[in-house]
């Protein structure tokens, strides 16, 4: 009964380094999302997917790439990290996009 | 474009007092609306949702919200605050376009004092 699992939970990167955040869900949900949370900004959508093999840009996609090769996994990549990408990243999933999302516990990323 | 506005970034109440967190939405069609709660260092949990059925929606932990189309509002209330209600609360709207994602407000931090 894991729900949505995000790895890693914490990470510190140097400017210019790359990394991949993994989101895995075991609920057979079609829709998956990546948001970033910054103080006073709420949650802003980075990318999302409406099914295996599909991805779409959200509100703040620049500097990020995503892949959904398997239905249960949604990967968020940072090719060249910048301090502006210091944030808490949340993954979420939804059965059909119409109702409530299930969120992971977040990844706290610091870029120095 | 649809959006939500949460009035007040911080709300402070005493234990046992009424909790009122305000949310207004902009939408040209009846929306789906949600309230989420986030406890420190955790992800978001769904409190309640409005999906065009009853206008008064009851959620978990004694919270409820009323959809008022004339006021474009979906305020969250709880009759009596408890210390454990201290958290950040987010209102969200689901755009009417198929295949899109929830749009969140900027959040309201609720503090509860004894």
Image: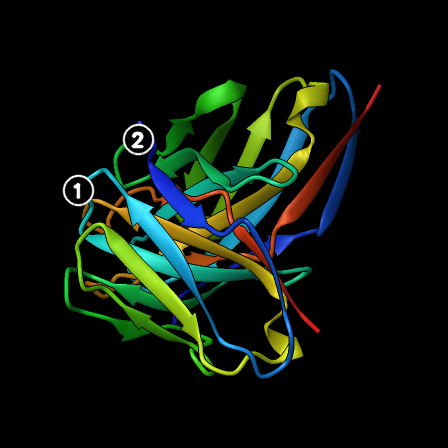
In the rendered view, does B90 fall on the left or right side of B69?
right
Residue drawn at (79%, 36%), measured in percent from left and top? B12
Which residue shows up at 42% across the image and 40% down it? Answer: B67
Say whether residue A55 is left or right of residue A82: left
Q: Give the percent coordinates (x, y) of residue B29.
A: 28, 60
For the residues beneath circles 1 and 2, the answer to whether they share a chain is: no
Q: Quadrant of the N terminus of chain B?
A: bottom left
Mark on residue A62? none
Subunit bearing disc 1: A
Q: Is residue A17 visible?
A: yes
- The correct choice, above or below, for B79 with respect to A74 in the image is above
Q: Looking at the image, is A2 positioned above or below residue B11? A: above
The CA distance from mark 1 to mark 2 is 29 Å
Residue sitting at x 53%, y 53%: A107
Residue A18 position within the rendered picture, expressed as x and y whole percent measured from the top left: 49, 76
Residue at mark 1 = A28
For the residue pair A18 and B62, the one nearer the viewer reads as: A18
Pick the front one: B59 or B41 = B41
Could you tell me residue B24's position as x and y percent? 52, 53
Question: SS for tag 2?
Answer: loop
State which quarter of the image contains the C terminus of chain B.
top right
* Marked residue chain, label 2: B
Residue matched to label 2: B54
- Crowding at dot 1, Cα within 10 Å, few <14 / some 14-19 / many 20+, comes out as few
């Amino acid at each position: 009964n894991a729900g949505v699992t995000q790895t890693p939970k914490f990470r510190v990167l140097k400017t210019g380094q790359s990394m991949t955040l993994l989101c895995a869900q075991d609920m057979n949900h079609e829709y998956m999302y990546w948001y970033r949370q910054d103080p006073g900004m709420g949650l802003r959508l980075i990318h999302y997917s409406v099914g295996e093999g599909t991805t779409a840009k959200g509100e703040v996609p620049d500097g990020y790439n995503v892949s959904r090769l398997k239905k249960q996994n949604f990967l968020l990549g940072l090719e060249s990290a910048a301090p502006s990408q210091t944030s808490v990243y949340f993954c979420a999933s939804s059965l059909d996009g119409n109702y409530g999302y299930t969120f992971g516990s977040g990844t706290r990323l610091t870029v120095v | 474009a649809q959006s939500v506005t949460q009035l007040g970034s911080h709300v402070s109440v005493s234990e046992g007092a009424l909790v009122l967190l305000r949310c207004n939405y902009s939408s040209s069609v009846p929306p789906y609306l949600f309230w989420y709660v986030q406890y420190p260092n955790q992800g978001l949990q769904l409190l309640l949702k409005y999906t065009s059925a009853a206008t008064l929606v009851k959620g978990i932990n004694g919270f409820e919200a009323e959809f008022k189309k004339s006021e474009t509002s979906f305020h969250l209330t709880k009759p009596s605050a408890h210390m454990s209600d201290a958290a950040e609360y987010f209102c969200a709207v689901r755009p009417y376009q198929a295949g899109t994602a929830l749009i969140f407000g900027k959040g309201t931090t609720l503090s509860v004092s004894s």
